[in-house]
Structure formats: C-alpha cells, structure tokens
Image (tube, rainbow, N blue to C red):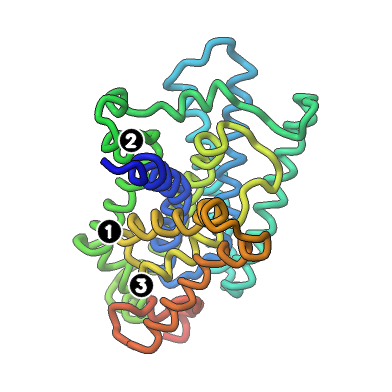
C-alpha cells in the first residue's frame, strides 16, 4: 500500500466524512421539507438550535450526576436536540402554512432567530460555569457520543475508513436511506410529492395538504437538528462556543440542490462537500497557498453548487427539477 494512500488519502477521507455528516443531516431534513413545497431557509438556525438543545440537555445532566449513565447521557441531549429543532419547524409551519407568511423571509428570519437564541442560551451557560474561556465543555458527554465500533482498529485502513465513526454518523446514512425509500416507494411519499407538485390537485384527491406540510417540515427540522448535535458532541469534542458552527447550515441547503433533491445522493454528496470544505488545508501544505488563495479555495462547494444549478436549469428535465410548487403558499379558497 502506497505511503500517499495511508498517510494522506485515508485521513483526508475520514475527515471529509466527519465534515459531511452534519451536512447530510441538514440536507436530508431540508429535502423532506422541500418535497412538501416549502423552502425552509431557516435550516441553519434550526441546526444551531438543535446543537444548543443538545448542549443544554447534556449540561443539566452532567451537573446533576457524578457518574453518567451511558443510555441517559446520550438520550437526554438527543431528545433536547429533537425538541428544540422540532419547535423551530413548528414555528416555521405556523407562520408559512397557517398564516401563509412569505417562505423566504420567514426562513431567513428563523435563521437569525435560531442563531440569536442559541447564542443567548450558550452565553448563559458560559456565565453559569464561570469558565476562564468563553466555552461550555462537556467532555463526559462527548466521550459517550464519540465511541466507535470496537473492531475498527483491527481492520487497518479499511476499518479506519468505514467503521471508525460514531453512531450518529451511521444514523445519518440510515435516515437518508429511509427518507429515499419513503419518498420513492411508499404511499406516504407519493402523497408528499403530490403536495409539493400541485397541492390543489392533492387536495382535490382527498390528501390533507396542511398535515403533510406540517409533518414533513417538523420531521425534517428534527433531522436537521441532529446535524447540529453531531457537530458539537462529536466533531467539536463536546465544546460549545457562540458562533462556532460556521456556514454548515447554508452548505446543507446548497447540498440539496447539488444532489437534485434526492436523499440517497446526499450520502455521497455530503462526503464530497465535506472534502471540498477541508481541501484547502491540504492544498495549503502542498502548494503553499497564500491566505487569499485559501479563501478562494474555500468557495469551492458554493461554486460547484452554482454550476450544478446552471446545468440542471439548461437541461430542463423534469426529474432534475425542484418540486413545482416550491416556495409558493397554498390558498385553498383559490382552488
């Protein structure tokens, strides 16, 4: 086995997967929402709320007990994360489905709201801990979330590339596969796609349009929130710092376009985006790039998304297009 493969490619692949998992959660959740005809640009704020929700749950539990129960140490942050992100999805639905507010404006407002709330709660926890650094450190919870499969180290480079990740990484793939199956192979998925394509026709066929929009958006938000939880509890080693999430929420939205609204493709697309997100580190070492060049390289995921968007717009094939009613509110009385 070549030295390049073992010392450069294998570590790069593993880091790309770790970077891609939050994007996979976010993109899968957003696809479910967009399949109902709603464009939720509040995904970055939702992922942020999912992250701080997990931090709050873990912080409370760590403060209450001396020795963490492994099951409760995982389930409490997980449930808090799902609760916080689910409430974001519920708020978005209330505003856009019930009150019929503009989807774009509402989504952007919720992103600002989610980041602001997350920073407020995070700052409050930092003050409670009276730490010397502006961080909340949850090492014991991180140790539970980052456990890998025990036999990974025995399989060499193959084990490192395939089996060296935490359970949330594998859960992200499982959820994407389930989402793809539900959308393409079940009656529920057929109804959801019908709502996104033509809610008036779906309504006339007896499908409860509002229910599908609510459920798909809330479930999608909860899935996206798990991306924030993974980032904090695994990638960031259980350390919360305000505004430390970066632009991963927007990358998740871009990934939806890149993968043509297909959850199965998101699995591979997220790892590609994860690699593009960190490739500047490797190019800097190899090519001695300047700071300005590094910033240009970091634009790669967004440039690729724009190129894909141009390509699918030119092809104009129905299977590569977004849901026909995406971003438009449904007014039943105008049916």
The residue nearer to you, when weighing 285 against 84, is 285
In contact (CB < 8 Å): disc 1 and disc 2: no
In contact (CB < 8 Å): disc 3 and disc 1: no
The residue nearer to you, when weighing 242 against 205, is 242
Q: Residue at x 53, y 45 (%)?
A: 228
Q: Is residue 327 left or right of residue 36?
A: right
Q: Is residue 326 above or below residue 295?
A: below
Measure how far apart labels 3 and 1 are at the Cα level.
17 Å
Q: Is residue 219 above or below residue 265?
A: above
The residue nearer to you, when weighing 290 against 240, is 290
The residue identified by callout 3 is: 195
- Quarter of the picture containing the N terminus is top left
Measure how far apart labels 1 and 2 are at the Cα level.
27 Å
Mark 1 Cα shell of 10 Å, populated few (<14), some (14-19), many (≥20): many
Q: Is residue 298 left or right of residue 8?
A: right
The residue identified by callout 1 is: 180
Q: Is residue 135 left or right of residue 328?
A: right
Q: Residue at x 49, y 42 (%)?
A: 82
The residue identified by callout 2 is: 160
- Mark 3 vs mark 1: in front: 1
């Amino acid at each position: 086995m070549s030295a390049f493969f073992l010392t450069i490619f294998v570590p790069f692949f593993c880091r790309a997967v770790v970077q891609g998992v939050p994007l996979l959660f976010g993109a899968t959740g957003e696809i479910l929402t967009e399949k109902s005809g709603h464009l939720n640009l509040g995904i970055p704020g939702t992922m942020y709320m999912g992250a701080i929700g997990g931090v709050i749950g873990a912080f409370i539990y760590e403060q209450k007990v001396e020795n963490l129960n492994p099951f409760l140490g995982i389930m409490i942050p997980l449930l808090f994360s799902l609760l916080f992100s689910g409430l974001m999805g519920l708020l978005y639905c209330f505003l856009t489905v019930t009150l019929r507010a503009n989807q774009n404006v509402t989504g952007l407002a919720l992103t600002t709201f989610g980041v602001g709330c997350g920073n407020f709660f995070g700052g409050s926890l930092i003050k409670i801990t009276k730490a010397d650094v502006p961080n909340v450190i949850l090492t014991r919870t991180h140790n539970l979330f980052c456990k890998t499969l025990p036999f990974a180290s025995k399989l060499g480079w193959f084990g490192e590339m395939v089996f060296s990740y935490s359970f949330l990484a594998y859960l992200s793939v499982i959820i994407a596969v389930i989402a793809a199956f539900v959308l393409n192979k079940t009656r529920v998925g057929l109804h959801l796609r019908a709502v996104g394509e033509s809610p008036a026709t779906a309504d006339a066929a007896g499908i409860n349009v509002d229910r599908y929009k609510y459920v798909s958006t809330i479930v999608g938000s909860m899935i996206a929130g798990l991306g924030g939880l993974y980032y904090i509890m695994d990638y960031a080693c259980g350390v919360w710092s305000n505004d430390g999430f970066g632009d991963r929420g927007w990358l998740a939205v871009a990934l939806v376009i890149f993968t043509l609204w297909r959850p199965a493709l998101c699995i591979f697309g997220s790892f590609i985006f994860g690699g593009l997100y960190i490739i500047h580190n490797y190019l800097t070492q190899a090519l001695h790039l300047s700071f300005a060049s590094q910033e240009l390289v970091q634009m790669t995921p967004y440039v690729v998304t724009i190129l894909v968007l141009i390509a699918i717009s030119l092809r104009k094939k129905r299977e590569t297009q977004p849901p026909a009613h995406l971003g438009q509110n449904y007014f039943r009385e105008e049916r």
